[in-house]
Amino acid sequence: MSSFYSLLKVIRQSIIQIGFQYNIKYIKGKRMKLKKYLETKELTQEKFIQEMEDQTGHKLSQGGLSKYVLEYRIPRKAEMVAIHEYTKGEVEPNDFYL
């Protein structure tokens, strides 16, 4: 029975560590919404659309991007993947939900 409890203890510690590593980005304020990304990189929506299309091959409409920036709409999976790839992971899918 003691090996069972030892295993549970190891699993619990692993889960705590994984959760800590995942949430550290939010604790340190590194979470980045699309609007903040555009402001930080000094990109207009038009420039973002053009550069993202050049880099990923995925084109967004300006109206669609505007709704993502204002958080009126959540991008579909294909758009989220393209945004994540273009921003090199700075804007993550969770950033559209949280």
Image (cartoon, helix red, strand yellow):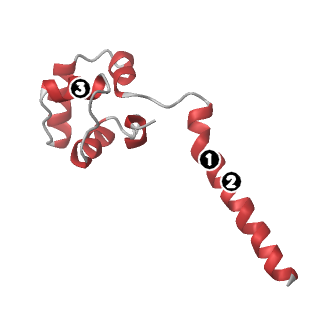
Considering every residue shown, the one lying at the far bottom of the view is: 1
In this rendering, the answer to whether 40 lies above or below 6 is above
For this view, does 49 lie left or right of residue 75? left
Query: What amino acid does circle 3 point to?
Result: Lys
Label 1: few (<14), some or many (≥20) within 10 Å?
Answer: few
Q: Residue 58: image x %, image y %?
A: 15, 41
Q: Residue at x 62, y 33 (%)?
A: 27
Q: Residue at x 29, y 24 (%)?
A: 69
Q: Nearer the viewer, mark 1 or mark 3?
A: 3
**What is the secondary structure assignment of the residue under circle 2?**
helix
Q: Residue 65: image x %, image y %?
A: 21, 27
The residue that disc 2 covers is 17
Q: Residue 44: image x %, image y %?
A: 23, 16
Query: What amino acid does circle 1 point to?
Result: Gln
Image quarter where the N terminus lies is bottom right
Residues 54 and 68: in front is 68
The residue that disc 1 covers is 21
Callout 3–callout 2 Cβ contact below 8 Å: no
Q: Which mark is residue 67?
A: 3
